[in-house]
Image (tube, rainbow, N blue to C red):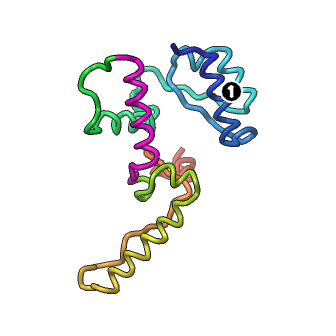
């Protein structure tokens, strides 16, 4: 069952395991009681994490979670019937998370996995991929009407990037 105590424990463990203590972080979540409970909010404050909550009845307020749910639902092995047990649900979810983080190549990450990005090996993977494309173009230039794909890793990845720079918005006001 969800609880503020379990959510706080998860946040403490994750913060320690990932070396995030003292770094400016924002945790965006829904308005569930586990995330808004006093224990969780106190833990976030102690860890220096700013709590951010979705607006009521706004389905795209957290596009990363929404995109994750969409990816989950469109998996060929997504169950069409209810799980037979909590254990079956946990087993399927663990398999999905492993696939999502270690096998699924994300278009927003230049087709590397989140695990490759997190471990810091994405740059090497993309450099190798860039070399393969350059060799292919050199061997058969008539197949290429312009340059090869850009395989440079972006520092930041956004699902809903701001299209208008903030400076322009300030001038409009």
Residue 150 image position (x, y, % from top left): 42, 69
Badge 1 marks a residue whose secondary structure is helix
Q: Is residue 32 depicted above or below 16 in this figure?
A: above
Q: Is residue 170 depicted above or below 153 in this figure?
A: above
The residue under label 1 is 44
Q: In the image, which residues are magenta?
A: 85-107
Tell me which corner region of the image, top left, top right, bottom left or bottom right, holds residue 67: top left
Residue 9 image position (x, y, % from top left): 65, 23
Q: Is residue 103 depicted above or below 67 in this figure?
A: below
- Left or right, 123 with respect to 79, comes to right
Residue at image location 47% in from the left, 66% down from the top: 126
Residue at image location 75% in from the left, 39% down from the top: 22
Q: Quadrant of the C terminus?
A: top right
Residue at image location 69% in from the left, 41% down from the top: 20
Q: Is residue 38 magenta?
A: no
Residue at image location 51% in from the left, 19% down from the top: 31
- Left or right, 161 with respect to 17, comes to left
Q: Is residue 10 depicted above or below 117 in this figure?
A: above
Tell me which corner region of the image, top left, top right, bottom left or bottom right, holds residue 141: bottom left
Tell me which secondary structure the magenta stretch mostly adopts.
helix
Residue 3 image position (x, y, % from top left): 57, 14
């Amino acid at each position: 069952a969800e609880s503020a105590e379990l959510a706080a424990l998860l946040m403490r463990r994750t913060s320690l395991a990932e070396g995030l203590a003292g770094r400016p972080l924002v945790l965006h979540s829904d308005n569930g009681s586990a995330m808004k409970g006093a224990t969780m909010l106190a833990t976030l404050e102690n860890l220096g994490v700013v709590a951010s909550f979705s607006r009521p009845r706004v389905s795209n307020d957290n596009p990363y979670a929404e995109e994750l749910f969409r990816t989950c639902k469109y998996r060929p092995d997504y169950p069409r019937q209810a799980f037979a047990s909590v254990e079956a649900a946990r087993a399927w979810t663990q398999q999905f998370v492993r696939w999502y983080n270690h096998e699924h190549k994300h278009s927003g990450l230049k087709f590397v996995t989140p695990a490759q990005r997190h471990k810091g090996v994405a740059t090497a993977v993309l450099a190798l991929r860039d070399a393969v494309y350059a060799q292919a173009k050199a061997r058969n230039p008539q197949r290429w009407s312009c340059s090869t794909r850009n395989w440079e890793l972006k520092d930041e990845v956004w699902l809903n990037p701001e299209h208008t720079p903030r400076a322009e918005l300030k001038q409009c006001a």
